[in-house]
Amino acid sequence: MVIRNPHLSSAPPSLFPISIHKFQNYNQYHSPTLSFTQLQPKLNVPSTQLHIKLNETQQLHGHFIKTAFNCSYQVPLAALESYSSNAAIHSFLITSYIKNNCPADAAKIYAYMRRTDIEVDNFIIPSVLKACCFIPSILLGQEVHGFVVKNGFHGDVFVCNALIMMYSEVGSLTSARLLFDEMENKDAVSWSTMIRSYDRNGLLNEALDLLRDMHVMGVEPSEITMISITHVLAELAHLKMGKAMHAYVIRNGKCGKLVVPLSTALIDMYVKYENLAYARRLFDGMSGASIISWTAMIAGYIHCNSLSEGLRLFVKMLGEGMFPNEITMLSLVKECGTAGALGKWLHAFTLRSGFTMSLVLATAFIDMYGKCGDVRSSRSVFNSFKKKDLMMWSAMISAYAQNNCIDEAFDIFVHMTDCGIRPNEVIMTSLLTLCAKAGSLEMGKWIHSYIDKQGIKGDMILRTSLIDMYAKCGDIDTAHRLFAATTDRDVSMWNAMIYGFAMHGHGEAALELFEKMEAIGVIPNGITFIGVLHACSHSGLLQEGKRLFHKMVHELGFVPKAEHYGCMVDLLGRAGLLDEAKELIENMPMRPSVAVFGSLLAACKVHKNIKLGEWAAKQFLSLEPQKSGYNVLMSNIYASANRWGDVAYIRKAMKGEGIVKEPGVSSIEVNGSLHEFVMGDREHPDAKKIYEMIGEMREKLEDAGYTPDISSVLLNIDDEEKETALNYHSEKLAMAYGLISTAPGIPIRIVKNLRICDDCHNATKLLSKIYRREIIVRDRNRFHHFKEGSCSCCDYW
């Protein structure tokens, strides 16, 4: 958390420590009589103009080492003959190493200067601080800060601006703000640097507050400041302030004209508002649009799904002799998202044009194809590179993870580690997400163990992913232990734990956690309320759910989204308040989503309200006519009322429109392998043993007095055939395989892609008691923990 006025907080008394690791004895490296002079700006500083390649820099550095930096020797570079002092030569080397992306070498030269009493002036300090940003190293930055204060450079505004930038880049924004507040003479760059720091760290409201302070102080914002604020307003989706900003920059621009970078930032802002008309008007009014401007406008069309217009503008750009660079291609490929056709066209253009396919661009194509569900093309791009960096491996694993290809993802992971590449937290997060989707607890535990053994640094996202994985794989106790063991929790981690409790039907625990979260000052977001409303829905906490929705809207000022209304419709529907649910839908300020109508339709099936179900189905099908699930749900409503003519009509219509019913699939993990079953499946290698166990289960159920619930079979067949069909539901086949493949007493964990049927639910309760097994089933909606003849849902699902 960044404090608005950090000097009022309990910050450490000193912000300027000397690094005790590198400079334990200051006098060991510095003469007590050595003086440091604060230099005045020179008219000609050739080091800022001269740029040489890395190998030339290294050769030059070697020459100076051999000659002990004696300036009387001839310098092997004519442009450096004007450098007549050791300090100037060292300054040039520091700058050159930074320009050649070798900040650590620049830092070593600075350390050498300190060690050998070579003068370090206020022109070298900003370069060294830039190296600290690139490494990054807050320890070295703090040492330089201490040196600045000891030698009287803290009054130099250029040095202070460089210190602010350094602290923000190395992740110490509080220190940056403290330094900014203590500056006596701030210039426009100081304000711009601090605003940009807030922007880059996602603290958008703080950036706006600082802009207001800047205005009150009468400081005129620079072009860079206005670009940063434009980005802030775009991210906040604040159209009114964005237009006001646009008007301000026009009034204060030279002759009313905008410079290209600022115009490009405004185009990007309007694109994020999805206001393409304003963006295009700005673009068409530009004189001398840069490649970045073209990129912003084309990417805007793609972002707003105006693919044909984006493609036409791309072709127009080529016609005007403006050829895209790598940044252009990266931006466009990134915006493609799930627009696979356009992504493929861009890929083909890249290959046809002889464009150099860098690792970064290839990685973007791998990611794009993965998001489009085309993992074969992702793998093709991946295989075309012999030398792969960590990001490319990560993108390929992520592509498989997004498409639920668990075996392929782990194969790539093993191949990567065999090549000696150490995975990072991003890769481990992708694998954990995949395990969470598949409900693969054993693989998830293996990844957790691997993270611990390899000492992979667990950032907030990775720790949250672990909690989410355990919760979604049915081990809510381990998820809670990990959560309780973490002290620095962000809102995402709280959300993951709340949603975990909600999925498992622990509504009271979810609400208790929500109250604790608020009590310690963590501000909930929209996702938090989806979690708590979901918890209320699955635990029958009607009044609590209504109270929380009211609090969200009227006390905390949240604007409910369609997802929040969907949760409320689900809550009211499960409680049987179908008319109230319909009234809520009709009064929604936005167009209801398919999920909202789907919740009402599911409630109509449970409460057998055919009339309202027909209304909900009609609304739903007008939005997504190709969605099979709700056609089937309406068909089931008719079937439960024995209206077989209507059932036949819906199924015939589905067949005519090519809509295929999603088959029920149940999976179980045994010894690290996932086994999937569909109804009546006989393809499994152990099918004979499975069906023998099915027979045994049926006999034991009959002995216990169980009668099959044939109302769960929504087919127009006789009762005996219905009973037979019930025996071979996919979840019962998975359960049978679990019983023959695992040791007595071991919990059986099953994942089903659809809602568990009433008969399987009732049968599983008895089977958990008969076989003395805990049976955990994750269906489409929630978890069911069957134990000793009862279910955690209390038959409320």
Image (cartoon, rainbow, N blue to C red):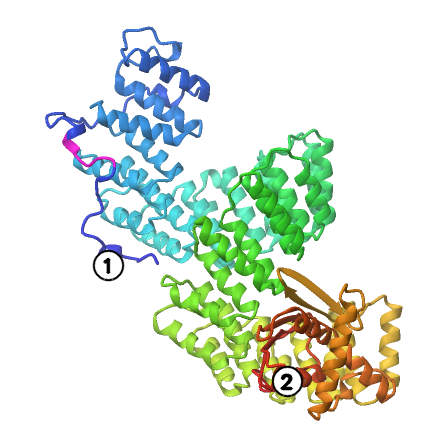
SS of the residue at dot 1? loop
Q: Residue at x 42, y 78 (%)?
A: 512
Q: What amino acid does circle 1 point to?
A: Ser
Q: Main secondary structure of the magenta part?
A: loop
Which residue is more in the foreground, 417 or 611?
417
Tell which of 285 and 633 is nearer to you. 633
Q: Quadrant of the N terminus?
A: bottom left
Tell me where residue 70 appears, x and y as whole percent.
27, 11
Quarter of the image that includes the C terminus:
bottom right
Instruction: Report the span colored magenta.
Output: 22-27
The answer to whether residue 359 is above or below residue 251 is above
Q: Is residue 511 visible?
A: yes
- Position of residue 171 measured from the top left corner of the image (x, y, whole percent): 36, 48
- The residue at which mark 1 appears reads as 9
Residue sitting farthest toward the bottom:
705
Decide which of tag 1 and tag 2 comes sooner along the chain: 1
Q: Is residue 48 left or right of residue 291?
A: left
* Nearer the observer, 715 or 259: 715
Q: Give the residue type at disc 2.
A: Ile
Q: Which mark is residue 62?
A: none
Dot 1 crowding, Cα within 10 Å, few <14, some 14–19, many 20+: few
Give how far across and how far down residue 118 sits, in percent: 22, 22
- Eye-nearest disc, 1 or 2: 2
Disc 2 element = helix
**In x, y percent, where is residue 534?**
55, 76
Q: Measure how far apart labels 1 and 2 are at the Cα level.
A: 62 Å
User: Is residue 398 highlighted in magenta?
Assistant: no
| Residue, disc 2 | 770
Tell me which corner region of the image, top left, top right, bottom left or bottom right, holds residue 94. Answer: top left
Q: Is residue 625 among what the camera can see?
A: no
Residue 336's place in the image compared with 156, above or below, is below
Query: In this rendering, would 29 be left or right of 280?
Result: left
